[in-house]
Image: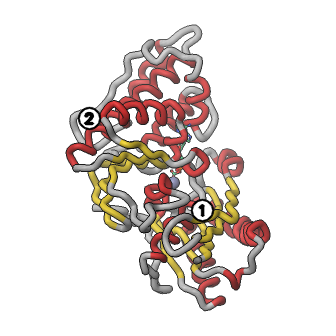
Amino acid sequence: MKTILALETSCDETAVAILRGRNSHSGSELLASEVASQIAEHEKHGGIVPEVAARNHLVHAPRLLERTTLDAKIDMSMVDVFAATSGPGLASSLMIGASIAKGLAIGFGKPYLAINHLEGHLLSPFFGGADSDGQIRPNVSLIASGGHTMLIRVHGLSDYQLIGRTVDDAAGEAFDKVAKMLGLGYPGGPEIEKHARAGDPDRFDLPRSMLESENFSFSGLKTAVRYLLPKLKGDFLADLCASFQQAVIDVLVRKSIAAPRKYGVDLVTMSGGVSCNRKLRRQLGEACARQGFEFKSAEAWLCTDNAAMIAFAALLRSQAGFESKLTEEIDPNLALAL
Ligand code: KG4
Ligand code: ZN
């Protein structure tokens, strides 16, 4: 029964979570999870300023460490493994979480585990328990977030193969940029989803790019919206949001259901901020069912950045015997799979 404390500071959210494995393999119990968002702070600057993000992590992390240990009713000395996101992300932000976790590991004489942020997302559909033998079932995994959009062939824990990735904007980035053009707030995904609810997804014929490729491209779609906007008059916001959202969903769904047969698996998983999107969850679920594939999405609260997913990846890795060296550096460009 291992207790993991994990920090996530790869971008603009400071997060700490404490997770306890129930027995050697099956199941885990989340004892505490806290996320401190810096959105309001960065909105003042019109985007994320790395220097500001790092300083905020320094302010928030000690407070969250105190709160989570109180919530979990544990003492730091009861933690068995200290984990932190070591990449990809902003160097100065990653450094804060990793340094704190390493310091705690040294101070309490416990192991340190460096976790890839994308592996945190990738494993989050299995949160709460892998298979009874601790295995992650082979699957095709869609990670769609603000920084990344990729399809991964998952053979098992730590055994990942890249199927395709975006060649330009990430899906979440497209939501954010289009929301900005429309004068909506940040993050753009939830704003567009909200307005799209009352809209007609067929009103505007927007491009679905690179459908025949395993890679993704969303910048053409964003540009199409930019060119269309000045020509529009009257009430168009809901229909434009709905049409844009549907174009992104069509691409994500089409590629995600084309891959399993080719790669010989019958399970599709989905994670990352964009997978909060209810219409995407529903339509990918329905498309998988039509093809006879099982579909597992991360629960909505686990889709956007958090430390529970980092703690879960650390728990599975720790149970599988992984440990990181204290000399292991953070890597802003850390790859998940080649
Ligand atoms: O995973 P995440 O929190 O951070 C990264 O690792 O990037 O993802 C944030 C992204 C943002 O681009 C945001 O607009 C998008 O996820 N997002 C959504 C929704 N909620 C968040 N996109 C579409 N629909 C949503 N409901
Ligand atoms: Zn993320």
Q: Quadrant of residue 181?
A: top right
Tag shown at residue 210: 2
Total numbered circles: 2
Q: Position of residue 97 (x, y in %)?
A: 60, 71
Residue 174 position (above or below residue 66)? above
- Closer-to-camera residue (9/52): 9
Q: Amino acid at mark 2?
A: Met
Residue 23 position (above or below residue 78)? above
Residue 336 falls left or right of residue 93 = left
Residue 15 position (above or below residue 210)? below
Front tag of 1 and 2:
1
Q: Which residue is mark 1?
A: 307
The alpha-carbon separation of the residues under discs 1 and 2 comes to 34 Å
The N terminus - image quarter? bottom right
Q: Position of residue 42 (x, y in %)?
A: 65, 50
- Closer-to-camera residue (155/53): 155
Residue at disc 1, secondary structure: loop
Visible residue check, residue 12:
yes
- Residue at mark 1: C-beta within 8 A of ligand 2: no
Question: Residue at the spot x=58%, y=87% of the render?
Answer: 110
